[in-house]
Amino acid sequence: MISLDVQSKYKQDEASKATIDEEAEEAYSEAVEPLREYAKNLVRISNAYVKSDPRNTLAATCALTWLNHWAAADAMTAMRSKQARFNLGQALGGFALAYLQIRNAPGLAEDQKKRVEAWLKALGLQIQEFMDGNKEVSGRNNHRYWAGLSAAAAGIASGDKRLTDWGIDSARIGLAQITPDGTLPLEVKRGKRARDYHIFAAQPLVATAELARSQGVDLYAENDGALSKLVKRVVDSLDDPSFLRRPAARSRRPIRAATRCRPTASPGWKSTRAVSPHLRLKRSWRKNALSPPAESVGI
């Protein structure tokens, strides 16, 4: 999949963009299904390598083969709509994190690694350019956090510090908006889908914080521990979503391994699950398949 041209599945005449247009959703799902399938299997293969003991180097080679197949074809380099760029902002994180999991495996082809790294960087820069020019709400809400995760992961994978720093700073845009009660005002505005979008926004913020920590940056400590407040609010909402539906909350202001190694023809999407120190949140996403909530969010 080199190009993608999709539109949002939500009804556009609604301020909260919380109601799905069934016809639009059908067209959207059909268009992005190859992307979802590719990424889902790519992540399963790379996870299989990490989980194996002793290390299954064939899984690492397989994952690199999948990535190289897309890199050689310049996949995802022609995004033809705003929604398609959002999809890229989510998908690249899965690609780059999968690569980071396997890149140090022994015996990988260096020429393929270089090609993949250059491709990841090019996609990261494409996301950065789009988001830097995006003055809409989507330049500050969950879309920005997913773009930041993708850029940070692609920057680390390709050794581009400026891209990595941009990704980390994108997370800071979200951290600066977290209120003392752990909510994100822009996600609260999604009305009946506020909880889903808090879950969706927390995922890239936590994952970026983990990447930032590997670079010597402690995002968990910034803004008076704002990220932990968001995570607590999200975890609590899994048991009781009522808080995120209260008008009071809306008025707050900020202070399985794949068994084949033949790349599919089109890319897919896979979100990154949170890692420690928020283990319960991680397990909740895994248990409830919130990656992202199937009925609520974008890709």
Image (spheres, rainbow, N blue to C red):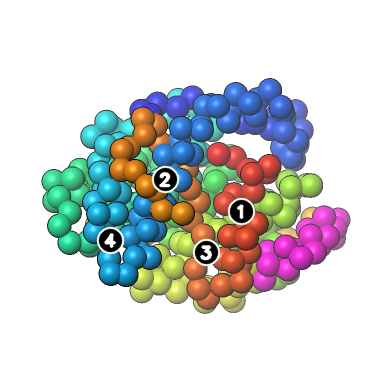
Mark carried by residue 56:
4
Give me the residue at 46% from left, 61% from top: 208
* Element at label 4: loop
- Mark 1 neighbour class, 10 Å CA radius: few under 14, some 14 to 19, many 20 or more: few
- Which numbered disc, 4 or 2, marks the residue that appears first in the sequence? 2
Please state if 22 lies on the left or on the right of 7 as rendered: right
Q: Which residue is mark 1?
A: 289
Horizontal side of 288 relative to 116 (left or right) equals: right
Q: Is the residue marked by circle 3 packed among few (<14), some (14-19), or many (20+) residues within 10 Å? A: many
Bounds of the magenta segment: 232-248
Give the label, 4 or 2, closer to the camera.
Answer: 4
**264 magenta-colored:** no
Tell me the kind of residue under disc 3.
Ala
Q: Secondary structure at mark 1?
A: loop
Is the C-beta separation of discs 2 and 3 under 8 Å?
no
Q: Amino acid at mark 2?
A: Asn
Classify 90 as above or below 219: above
State which quadrant residue 181 falls in: bottom right
C-alpha separation, residue under disc 1 versus residue under disc 3: 13 Å
Amino acid residing under circle 1: Ala
Residue drawn 59% across the image and 76% down it = 224
Question: Where in the figure is residue 22, as x and y percent of width and height?
Answer: 71, 27
Query: Looking at the rendered structure, which numbered label has been put on residue 41?
Result: 2
Marks 1 & 3, CB-CB < 8 Å contact:
no
Name the mark on residue 274: 3
Name the residue at 86% across, 56% down.
247
The C terminus sits in image quarter: top right
Asked if the magenta segment contains residue 240, the reply would be yes
Q: Alpha-carbon distance for marks 2 and 1?
A: 16 Å
